[in-house]
Amino acid sequence: MSSPAPFRLTGVQWLVCTIAAIGFAFDIYELLMLPLIIKPAIASLSAPLIEQAVAGGLSRPEAVQLWLPGGTNYGWWARMLFFAPAVAGGAFGLLGGWLTDRMGRRRVLTFSILLYAFGAFAAGFATTLPYLLFCRCCVFVGVCVEFVAAVAWLAELFPVHDQREKVLGWTQAFSSLGGLLVAGMNILAGMYANSLPEIAGGHEAWRYTLISGVIPALPLLLIRPFLPESPEWQKKKEAGTLKRPRISELFSPELRTTTIVTTLVFAASYGLAFGAIQQLPQILGAQALGTPAEAGHQEVIAAAKAKVGDPQGTNAKTGKPEYTPDQKRAAGNESDAVVAKVTLSQELGGLVGRALLAFLALKIVSRRSLLRVFQIPAMIFIPVLFYWISGALQSDSLFMIKVGIFVAGVLVVAQFSFWGNYIPLVFPVHLRGTGESFAANIGGRILGTAAAFITITLATASPPNPGRMALVGACVAGAYAVVGVLLTNFLPEPGKVDHQD
């Protein structure tokens, strides 16, 4: 019996895998950026609004309170920044998936990466919250379309099962590299913000972190002329046998169960992340010094205070220590850097999870069983972890939180990689982009990301209470996880031969 031929890539295949890996990495880079920068961004962009409220007769402590985490205005904008871009990404991402089936994988992939790079760069210069929201919507649209185009492209470029599983598994592993990169970039931005060019009158770390999202556009501009189209799609297009994609066909008797169950279980995976894990920077991060409340983990607050030194006096009305704007900015940058190191642990776990998924995908035949390896432990571990965090914010527990969030990253991020391997096997070529887009964007980006909206809404309280947010996150993530585990019983197993037109 002859042994299988070794798995080797041609030069063109290496090029395709490289650009897809860059796209996957910066997908997650952009998605994980918001939890890192949302608090300092809202604090900065709400400052003129606070002054307007004071000029209108509201006392300064009352005006500031509205814009602290847990305050009414902060909660509204936090929900909008998490959920509105997801809705935009889901809607336009579904259109992008349809265009992927109509216009080809390569063209749509290229423009999607350029779109989110432009949106990220422009966001760094935001001077108002609506402007930042618009830029984040552009970013999400690009990210949602890119994922669908890249997965379809790779699945069709590597028709041999083992090759396809390896390529999809290992290129998606670069998504966690994107998480590591954004955490590292945020740390560097916090450390060197004062040495970078001034933006909007200051040196705020969150702006430099946002601008760094332009990086993936640079190699793409050089590589694009050498990228091939999907041979499977191109062959059918040239032969005139490529069927016209119709969203209604996803709900035909042959595909209805696949579409609905895949969409809902995909949403459950994202709900674990956005309901709890992605709220951790808000739970841990210290508030600006000198405000009516300093909420967050005590080690983060202590690090922020140590960075700025002694206060410059005492506020006559509140009796609180008074700090200069530069001191508050330095404290915020230090808080960002400390919290980003915790996020780094999460992304290291995600990298391990994706690698483990890539390995197990070739060992476990049943796709349901493969998903359950990560799904069932996550259903138990993540609610328990965030329940514990809710009561551990006033203790020296930051190291244990890093350990816990590492494990959470392994269990949840591996599920994201699962979908990139699974979905191309259950939709035909002419509907592959559309089907992937519906499951990923309606399921993951809208229904899944809605978990962040739910957590922030239920956790809104005055005064700010990070422990409450952790507890609510435990409940929301647990509910999504239970739904996912139950519905996986109905997840269709791909046939021995891939579904074709």
Image (spheres, rainbow, N blue to C red):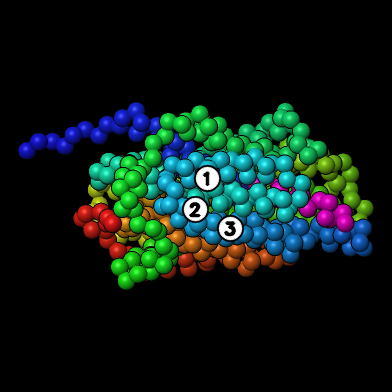
Which of the 4 image quadrants contains residue 57? bottom right
Q: What residue is drawn where x is 67% and y is 65%?
A: 460
- Residue 278 drawn at (x, y percent): 56, 53
Question: In this view of the protein, which residue sits in the foreground, 66 or 388?
Answer: 66
Question: In this view of the protein, which residue sits in the foreground, 284 or 228?
Answer: 228
Callout 1 amino acid? Ser
Which comes sooner in the sequence, label 2 or label 1? 2
Is residue 47 covered in magenta?
A: yes
Is residue 237 covered in magenta?
A: no
- Residue 485 drawn at (x, y percent): 38, 65
Q: CA distance from mark 3 to mark 1?
A: 14 Å
Q: For the residue labelled by badge 2, is the local secondary structure a helix, a strand or a loop? A: helix
Q: CA distance from mark 2 to mark 3?
A: 12 Å
* Residue hosting label 2: 96
* Residue hosting label 3: 88
Q: Which segment is the magenta one?
A: 37-52
Q: Is residue 274 left or right of residue 8?
A: right
Count neighbours of disc 1 (C-alpha within 10 A) and say few if under 14, some if 14 to 19, many if 20 or more.
many
Quadrant (top left, top right, bottom left, bottom right) of the C terminus: bottom left
Which of the 4 image quadrants contains residue 468? bottom right
* Residue hosting label 1: 112
Which comes sooner in the sequence, label 3 or label 1? 3
Quadrant (top left, top right, bottom left, bottom right) of the N terminus: top left
Which of the 4 image quadrants contains residue 328? top right
Q: CA distance from mark 2 to mark 1?
A: 9 Å
Q: What residue is drawn where x is 35% and y is 48%?
A: 237
